[in-house]
């Protein structure tokens, strides 16, 4: 993923100019992997709740 390479470009406050910001390589994937089970379980729970509300 591009954001894990140690730098990424983004607009300043959502506008021009775009800047390159240095970050620690892997800053996105490491926490995403660490929290994946909780996110997956939460998403699954919401899908089940929604299906139950719809009467499926």
Image: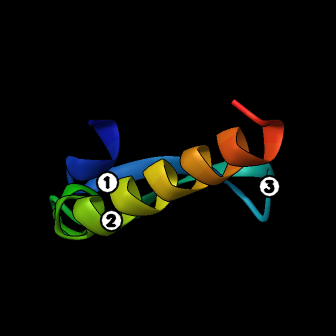
* C-alpha distance separating marks 3 and 1: 17 Å
* C-alpha distance separating marks 3 and 2: 18 Å
The quarter of the rendered structure image containing the C terminus is top right
Would residue 24 appear left or right of 48 to someone viewing this image?
left
* C-alpha distance separating marks 2 and 1: 4 Å
Element class at badge 3: loop
Q: Residue at x 64, y 53 (%)?
A: 49
Residue topped by disc 1: 7
Q: Residue furthest front?
A: 55
Element class at badge 2: strand
* Comes first in the chain, label 3 or label 2: 3
User: Residue 14: which quarter of the image?
Assistant: bottom right
Q: Are marks 2 and 1 in contact (CB under 8 Å)?
A: yes
Residue topped by disc 3: 14
Would residue 16 appear left or right of 42 to someone viewing this image?
right
Against 4, is 36 above or below? below
* Comes first in the chain, label 3 or label 1: 1
* Comes first in the chain, label 2 or label 1: 1
Q: Residue at x 17, y 69 (%)?
A: 34
Against 41, is 15 above or below? above
Residue topped by disc 2: 22
Residue 54 position within the rendered picture, expressed as x and y whole percent measured from the top left? 81, 37
Q: Residue at x 26, y 59 (%)?
A: 36
Residue 22 position within the rendered picture, expressed as x and y whole percent measured from the top left? 33, 65
Would residue 25 appear left or right of 35 to someone viewing this image?
left
């Amino acid at each position: 993923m591009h954001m894990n390479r140690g730098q990424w470009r983004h607009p300043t406050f959502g506008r021009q100019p775009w800047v390159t910001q240095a970050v620690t390589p892997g800053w996105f994937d490491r926490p995403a992997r660490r929290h994946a089970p909780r996110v997956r379980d939460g998403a699954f729970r919401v899908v089940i709740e929604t299906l139950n509300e719809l009467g499926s």
